[in-house]
Image (cartoon, rainbow, N blue to C red):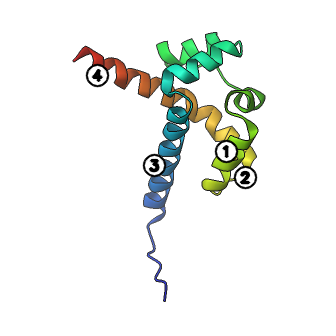
Amino acid sequence: MQRWIRLPKQLWGQLASEEFSLAVEDLIYRHGAVNGVVRRMEHLGLGSVARSWLRSNAYEPIYSEQLHALFGTGVLRALAAKLDLPPRDLVRILSQALPRAINRLASSKDQALAL
């Protein structure tokens, strides 16, 4: 018999957010980490977008078709299925989460190198 544990809604949201954050970080690492994603963005003509993510908190936006070009539709669909999200919702949320994740990972890498 399967037993379900009820989590308070606030905690569930936090866990879902953590799961999404980990999935985004995994996506970044599977595509060459920060450097690999930035190089791919530069190749796609999105260098200024990538630089805004690395150098400031005023992130230039990335759009749905650009995310599809960057990671591939199949990869995005698989990630949406893994996270149990409709693909459109995943892309919408990823467009907001990816700049923050790239900035955070680049900053933590810079801090590690400075030590």
Secondary structure under tag 2 reads loop
Q: Amino acid at mark 1?
A: Leu
Q: Where residue 46 is drawn, which disc sits there?
A: none
* Marks 2 and 1 close (CB-CB < 8 Å): yes
**Side (left or right) of 38 relative to 6:** right
* Marks 4 and 3 close (CB-CB < 8 Å): no
19 in relation to 9, above or below: above
* Residue neighbourhood size for the residue with mark 1, other residues' Cα within 10 Å, grouped as few (<14), some (14–19), many (≥20): some
Q: Where residue 18 is drawn, which disc sits there?
A: 3
* Marks 1 and 4 close (CB-CB < 8 Å): no
Residue 58 shows up from this direction = no
Q: CA distance from mark 4 to mark 3?
A: 22 Å
Residue 72 shows up from this direction = yes
Q: CA distance from mark 4 to mark 2?
A: 36 Å
Q: Amino acid at mark 2?
A: Pro
Residue 111's spot in the image, x, y percent? 30, 20
